[in-house]
Amino acid sequence: MGLSKSWLWLCFLLGVWTPQGNGKVYPRDIYRRTPKFRRAWTGVEANTGKNFGGWLLRILNSNGNFACGGAYYAPLLVITSANCIYPYRNSLEGATVEGTAVSKCDSENIAEIDTIQFPERFIYRKLYMDVAVVRLKEPIKGRLTEFIRLCTIKLQPTMRTVVFGWGFDSLEVQKPSPDPRNSSVTIISLKECRQKFGKKLALSSTSVCVRQPKNPRNCLYDGGSPMIYKRELCGVVSFGSQCQNTSYPGMFTNIIRVARFIKETEESIEAGYIFRSPRAKNKSPARMLRAPKVKKKVPVKIRTATTIAVIDTTKPTNVVKTTTIDPLESMVC
């Protein structure tokens, strides 16, 4: 029995308007007042293209070399490890932060570092309060760029989390990758962690330990790189174990334990209590090294839906076929 016309129209509308989970391309770049909730990462299933999320960042030193990993928290704020970024605190001229999710509409996705805020009780090469808030001069542009929420879940032993990195802190194991990688790890108790290290290292109340993968090549341990649980930032790589011997736990800063510092820093910046660095008169290296804008061909037809429904009239049942459109290919710059 053939399908009625009203049913066919219903299938057509569903085919056009039903979200397909192909990821999100934002209509415009981030600006200074972009609310965090409007660009919040909604999980791996929402990624567009080959990326782990528009919140994953690389911090580059003044020479353009990799320094630390980072997570995009707000338009001008990046979260990283204090131990990792501390050696660069006095040489910020030309230091930048770079996004890892790039679309064809992005001429650049890099921003210069303005200042770095450290907790008052942080001590270099110690684990307590090993977190830093990097303040940018301008937001990181990019139609795929987004923010990540701070952790709201207490980390417990046996929980599985995901860590990210490039391999720059484990050169003895393998060459670093130009693209980020990720790996799954398991949370262990601080008691078990202390037993593993013995007297070699003193853990702190702001630390959280994970059981490293047995294969060193699956170990990712770049300072400041994020650890996530579901859709939230729950840790950053701290000073400590690396990847030569994965029998030792990996140590991270527990974001829940340092969230107050992050939020108070954000509030102080918004209130004007923390000043920006003096503006240089000459053009900064990051601005001078911008790639020239390339004119891109604009499609004649603009498609706003994620799918197109095609009604096959050659068959008596009039079955509706749906063809998924790649949002990266269909986006208009």
Image: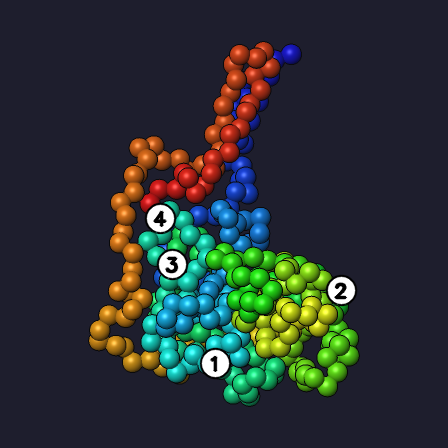
Pointer 4 with pointer 1, Cβ within 8 A: no
315 over 204 or under it: above or below: above
For residue 138, side relative to residue 99 (left or right): left
Asked whether the beta carbons under mark 2 and mark 3 sit within 8 Å of each other, the answer is no
User: Could you say which is closer to the camera, residue 72 or residue 87?
Assistant: 87
Mark 3 vs mark 1: in front: 1
- Whole-angstrom CA distance, mark 4 to mark 2, is 42 Å
Q: Secondary structure at mark 1?
A: helix
Residue corresponding to mark 4: 105
Residue 261 percent location from the top left of the image? 53, 79
| Secondary structure beneath label 2 | loop
Residue 257 in percent (x, y) is at 62, 77
Amino acid type at image mark 2? Thr
Query: What is the spatial separation of the Cα atoms under label 2 and label 3, in whole angstroms?
Result: 37 Å
Residue at 25% across, 77% down: 280
Q: Secondary structure at mark 3?
A: loop
Comparing labels 1 and 2, the label whose residue is closer to the camera: 1
Instruction: Please say which color scheme the image uses.
Output: rainbow
Pointer 3 residue: 109
Q: Mark 1 belongs to which amino acid?
A: Tyr
The residue that mark 1 highlights is: 86
Q: Quadrant of residue 112?
A: bottom left
**Crowdedness near tag 3: few (<14), some (14–19) or many (≥20) residues, C-alpha within 10 Å:** many
Query: In this rendering, is residue 107 above or below 64?
Result: above
Image side of residue 329 versus residue 227, left or right: left
Question: Which tag, 3 or 1, sits closer to the chain's start?
Answer: 1
Are the residues tagged 1 and 2 within 8 Å (C-beta)?
no
Residue in the foreground of this view, choosing between 313 and 144: 144
Asked whether the viewer can see residue 314, the reply is yes
Residue sitting at the far left: 281
